[in-house]
């Protein structure tokens, strides 16, 4: 057991070094890129980005939705990033967090290779489609906000249902039996929405893999992250090329998400998932209302 822990520690250190090198390369290639109408990087903003990333990584890992869905509204409503820039910046952050998380789950064999083969190719196709749609909507901030508002209703409703009526929620969805040959459909939807809205795919993939395809819970988070990782890479390249990413902000927040995700993984046993999901369902409903009312 001790040897296994030491091996995980060494592999984790190796993965962290790779992430640091990747971050340095992105900074060298795009670090001087300034996103239009983004707030100026000050000491207060740097601390806020680190803290926001830490919170997103921590609670994203605890409730199984990924950090992007928590961080994007903070970037937009809390820190003042325009919606298109918040989407692009969030997606680059998702790339780092999914890389860290999927690598950790992969070395522990917590990834369903079968589900990955069925879902990842269509998810990659979806991210190309979603990136194209994003270029059409990026200059229509009100419509993009409406779509974001609708997207946030999904995890909010699911979390309220699961938190208040966990037995009924599970029993209803346990009756659904869908062949794994339909996994590409889930992958396509996830990839498209990830590129279009920058939310990552955990809030769709995790419940989808559990309740629609009955994947063991222990494999869902790792599989979800492994699917999102290549999707977020391709989506981030499109966003970087279009100038929709505040690179320095993304790198700073990413450092927080990586640390927060590790803390979450180590402290999850001390929290009640139903309570956390109920709290965040209220948060997502609030975010949904804010996005939708900004469109009206």
Image (spheres, rainbow, N blue to C red):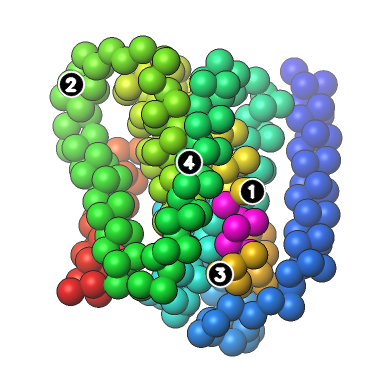
Which of discs 2 and 4 lies nearer the camera? The answer is 4
Q: Which residue is mark 1?
A: 233
C-alpha gap between disc 3 and disc 1: 14 Å
In the rendering, at what x and y percent does residue 44 appear? 58, 83
Circle nearer the N terminus (4, 1): 4
C-alpha gap between disc 1 and disc 2: 36 Å
Residue 5 is one of the magenta-drawn residues = no
Give the residue at x 30% y 45%: 155
* Span of residues in magenta: 235-240
For the residue pair 130 and 282, the one nearer the viewer reads as 130
Circle nearer the N terminus (4, 3): 4
For the residue pair 273 and 191, the one nearer the viewer reads as 191
Q: Which residue is mark 4?
A: 126
Q: Quadrant of residue 110?
A: top right
Query: Label 3: how many residues lie within 10 Å, few (<14), some (14-19) or many (20+)?
Result: many
In the rendering, at what x and y percent does residue 235 appear? 57, 52
Identify the disc placed on residue 53: none
Identify the disc placed on residue 244: 3
C-alpha gap between disc 4 and disc 1: 13 Å
Query: Label 2: how many residues lie within 10 Å, few (<14), some (14-19) or many (20+)?
Result: few
Circle nearer the N terminus (3, 2): 2
C-alpha gap between disc 4 and disc 3: 19 Å
């Amino acid at each position: 057991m001790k040897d296994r822990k030491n091996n995980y520690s060494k592999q984790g250190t190796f993965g962290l070094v790779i992430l640091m090198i990747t971050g340095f390369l992105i900074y060298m290639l795009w670090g001087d890129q300034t996103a239009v109408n983004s707030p100026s990087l000050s000491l207060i903003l740097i601390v806020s980005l680190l803290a926001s990333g830490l919170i997103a990584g921590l609670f994203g890992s605890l409730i199984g939705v990924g950090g992007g869905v928590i961080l994007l509204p903070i970037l937009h409503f809390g820190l003042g990033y325009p919606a298109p820039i918040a989407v692009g910046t969030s997606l680059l952050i998702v790339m780092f967090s999914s890389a860290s998380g999927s690598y950790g789950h992969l070395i522990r064999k917590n990834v369903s290779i079968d589900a990955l083969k069925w879902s990842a190719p269509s998810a990659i196709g979806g991210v190309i489609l979603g990136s194209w749609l994003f270029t059409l909507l990026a200059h229509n901030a009100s419509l993009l906000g409406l779509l974001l508002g609708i997207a946030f209703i999904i995890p909010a409703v699911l979390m309220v249902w699961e938190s208040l009526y966990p037995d009924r929620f599970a029993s209803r969805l346990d009756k659904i039996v869908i062949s794994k040959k339909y996994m590409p459909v889930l992958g396509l939807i996830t990839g498209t929405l990830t590129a279009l809205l920058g939310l990552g795919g955990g809030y769709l993939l995790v419940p989808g893999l559990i309740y629609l395809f009955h994947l063991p819970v222990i494999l869902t988070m790792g599989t979800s992250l492994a699917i999102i990782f290549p999707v977020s890479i391709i989506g981030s390249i499109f966003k970087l090329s279009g100038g929709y990413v505040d690179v320095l902000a993304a790198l700073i927040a990413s450092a927080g998400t990586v640390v927060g995700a590790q803390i979450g993984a180590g402290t999850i046993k001390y929290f009640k998932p139903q309570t956390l999901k109920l709290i965040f369902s209220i948060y997502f409903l609030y975010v949904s209302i804010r996005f939708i009312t900004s469109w009206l």
